[in-house]
Amino acid sequence: MNTHSISRRTFLKSTALSTAAASVGHLIPARALGSNDRIHFAVIGCGGMGTGHLSSLVKRSEADNIKVLAVSDVYKRRLTRAKGICGGEGYLDYRKLLERKDIDAVLIATPDHWHAKISIDAMEAGKHVYVEKPMTHTVEQAVQLRDAVKRCDKVLQVGPNGAGNDSYWVAREAIASGRIGKVTWAHASYNRNARICLFNDHQKIDPAAGPDKSGDDYVDWDMWLGHQWGLAPKIAWTPEHFFRFRKYWPYNGGVATDLLYHKLAPLLIAIAGPNGEYPRRVNANGGLYIEKDGRDIPDMFMMTADYPSDWSLFLVSTLTNDAGLPDRVYGKHGTMELGGEPSLRWNGAFKEEFQAKNDGKDEVRLPIKQRRDLEGNFIDVLRGKDKLACNADLGCATMVAIKMAVESFRQSKTMLWDAKAEKTVAA
């Protein structure tokens, strides 16, 4: 498995080092959330994604009766910018933010290798959590975080956007009622093809920033790495790693965790239900064919997975051509197209069986409704008005399959899921 993963004992022990988790008093939520109460937010990680979320939360403050009280980032310039957006307090060390009893929920948009630790620390400090995808950096962390949600009895939303698309929830009802027969496989893709790779172009390097700088140029590099908690190896200041972390294995799983997580989570909703399903066997292939700029990650990635309930999956993510595969589910009696209104059509010799389940029709289109985005869904769940679009069980099941694919690619091996021990083993 990933050489940068850490033992369960080390990881759980590291969460206790958080100031927020140090006292029993912080295990109790700051206050109960009523349907009319204002929800106090904080945002941890204020790069591109985090700033987008922060701006969105501020814009919806009045309509959704929320307020952002605090922000945290290890890069002072981003912290200053974030404070200006929300008018709240800023913290270089997120643990100081978690000490505040007036914060109900945190939105976490840090690099992947920090997702699990900050999420657990936040829940142990009595906060509800919205964590960006991917749920974690490793399989082991995903299982630990899933279990921590149950232990702390907190709400945790994971952020793959497709989980909020009604198409997949409508598809779930149709598949569960047998409208395309037994599902046997599905495929999807998330491809890009920019003249300058978006992992470079969208993550521009600030040459003035660094751990030896002062004022807004200061970066707490050791904290960002998290090496003292075993989250990533300790290395000298490397701007390329800091600003473009999605290209390097110690912090990210490349296109698999950054892009395909968006595809697998909603497909699991459609085929397996809101809690997902863990894979039985995963394989991946691909390579670095074009973007040879010193990165670790491939620019061509394909994965297959087999599931215990007898269906298989094929997912593709490439940075070399943006023509992709549709989100499509194949049943014994019919085929379903997803993304917009689900479209169902009979297949093979099973027209009669398809018609029997679809009001005598050869082809049907299922209406969908507009759902709240994932931020809105999270807010509604905190007020008891909705169910999570991507809960911890779905987030973990998605993470397990995606990370198994990453390890299959890196090790050139088939990866198997030991369901009893809840760990990955090489075939």
Image: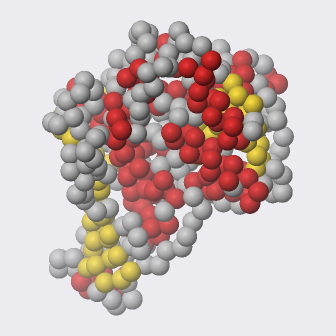
Asked whether the viewer can see residue 402, the reply is no
Find residue 10 and report its horizontal and vertical position in percent.
53, 14
Relative placement, left or right, of 142 versus 331 is: right
Relative placement, left or right, of 276 versus 290 is: right
Query: Could you tell me which quadrant the C terminus lies in?
Result: top left
Query: In the figure, 43 relative to 374: above or below?
Result: above
Work out which residue is located at the far front of the displayed protein and give it: 208
| Quarter residue 366 falls in | bottom left
Depth check: 93 or 408 in front?
Answer: 93
Relative placement, left or right, of 346 versus 204 is: left
Asked whether the viewer can see residue 101, the reply is yes
Q: Residue at x 32, y 69 (%)?
A: 337
Query: Could you tell me which quadrant the N terminus lies in?
Result: top left
The chosen color scheme is secondary structure
Q: Residue at x 42, y 27 (%)?
A: 205
Find residue 293 and report its horizontal and vertical position in percent.
23, 27
* Figure label count: 0
| Quarter residue 126 falls in | top right
Depth check: 93 or 83 in front?
Answer: 83
Q: Residue at x 21, y 76 (%)?
A: 347
Find residue 332 and report its horizontal and vertical position in percent.
25, 69
Find residue 20 and report its horizontal and vertical position in percent.
72, 22
Q: Residue at x 69, y 34 (%)?
A: 83
| Quarter residue 28 falls in | top right
